């Protein structure tokens, strides 16, 4: 089933040039520092001065507002710092226990198709989840990866509303000169109550979940390994630095 999921997402293999760098941050990264790094790196990639880069980070608790964010969707503006972002999408939360992956790839060397690129990112997440026996799914009109809820999960919050399906990963990207930045966020074991300060991605009729919430107390190292294996299936090999 994993091969079936990925078979249409292999348009983005690299062209045989230098391997992308695979970098894992060893401490929490401030959001402005992450944006500054991505801006500089994307420019360097476009100018041929740097290799592509996949950067795995965790952030302190914060909210970001994409280019389509609506003011009404920020429910608790004083709860955490709020940052305006150039990525696509609406409001989302980042914090400890969530793996954020910033993807700086040169689509000039791969496939210059934004829609297919977003789908490839979704399939990347789906392939990652499959390695933990979690079936992630795509929904028409809703960017990201979703999980059907067959029960309330092993760790339900008394205040948490139960939905038929929950979002486990968000995707928001920007392209400049066909070089991507921003990327994906996968909920491993964040405090899900922190999503209550926003309407995540502007969607009120569905909830959010995490691997821990689904009964999978996996480590971040486990998730990083699965992310790399799935990434290389779609986008080609990387070099850890």
Image: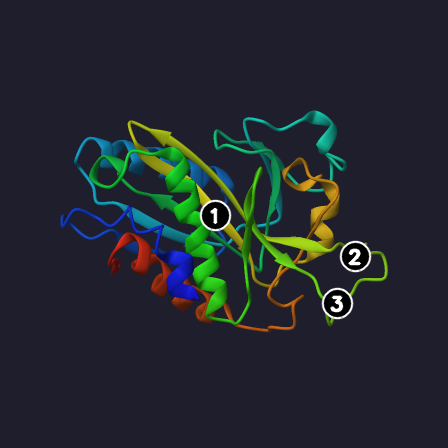
Name the one closer to the observer, 122 or 92. 122
Earlier in the chain: of badge 3 and badge 1, it is: 3
Earlier in the chain: of badge 1 and badge 2, it is: 2
Instruction: Answer few, some or many: residues within 10 Å of disc 1's Cα (few below 14, many 20 plus, some between 14 and 19).
Output: many
Residue at image position (74%, 42%) is 197
**Spot occupied by residue 213 in the image (x, y as percentages of width and height):** 67, 66
Residue at image position (37%, 64%) is 3
**Spot occupied by residue 113 in the image (x, y as percentages of width and height):** 33, 34
Instruction: Answer few, some or many: residues within 10 Å of disc 2's Cα (few below 14, many 20 plus, some between 14 and 19).
Output: some
Label 3, secondary structure: give it. Answer: loop
Name the one closer to the observer, 48 or 115. 115
User: Which residue is farthest left?
Assistant: 17
Q: Which residue is mark 2?
A: 162
**Spot occupied by residue 226 in the image (x, y as percentages of width and height):** 41, 67
**Spot occupied by residue 183 in the image (x, y as percentages of width and height):** 44, 44
Left or right: residue 42 versus residue 122 is: left
Tag 2–tag 3 contact (CB < 8 Å) = no
The quadrant of the image that shows the N terminus is bottom left
Earlier in the chain: of badge 2 and badge 3, it is: 3
Cα distance between the residues tagged 1 and 2: 24 Å
Residue at image position (30%, 42%) is 105
Instruction: Answer few, some or many: residues within 10 Å of disc 3's Cα (few below 14, many 20 plus, some between 14 and 19).
Output: few
Numbered badge on residue 151: 3
Q: Which residue is mark 1?
A: 184
Q: Is the residue 155 above or below the residue 44 in the image? A: below
Label 1, secondary structure: give it. Answer: strand
Residue 73 visible in the picture = yes
Left or right: residue 206 versus residue 93 is: right
Residue at image position (73%, 68%) is 153
Cα distance between the residues tagged 3 and 1: 26 Å
Q: Quadrant of residue 241?
A: bottom left
Numbered badge on residue 56: none
């Amino acid at each position: 089933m994993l091969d079936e999921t990925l078979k249409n997402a292999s348009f983005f293999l690299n062209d045989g040039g230098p391997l992308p760098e695979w970098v894992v941050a060893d401490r929490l990264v401030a959001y402005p520092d992450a944006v500054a790094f991505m801006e500089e790196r994307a420019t360097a990639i476009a100018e041929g001065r740097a290799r592509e880069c996949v950067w795995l980070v965790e952030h302190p608790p914060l909210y970001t507002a994409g280019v389509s964010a609506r003011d009404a969707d920020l429910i608790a503006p004083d709860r955490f710092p709020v940052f305006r972002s150039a990525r696509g999408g609406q409001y989302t939360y980042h914090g400890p226990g969530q793996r954020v992956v910033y993807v700086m790839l040169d689509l000039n060397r791969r496939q210059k198709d934004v829609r297919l690129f977003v789908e490839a990112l979704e399939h990347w997440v789906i392939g990652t989840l499959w390695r933990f026996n979690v079936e992630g799914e795509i929904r028409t009109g809703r960017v990201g990866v979703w999980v059907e809820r067959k029960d309330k999960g092993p760790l339900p919050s008394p205040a948490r509303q139960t939905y038929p399906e929950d979002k486990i990963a968000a995707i928001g990207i920007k392209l400049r000169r066909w070089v991507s930045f921003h990327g994906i966020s996968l909920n491993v074991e964040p405090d899900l109550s922190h999503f209550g300060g926003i309407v995540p991605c502007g969607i009120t009729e569905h909830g959010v979940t995490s691997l821990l919430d689904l009964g999978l107390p996996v480590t971040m190292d486990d998730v990083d390994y699965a992310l790399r294996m799935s990434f290389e299936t779609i986008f080609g090999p990387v070099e850890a630095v």
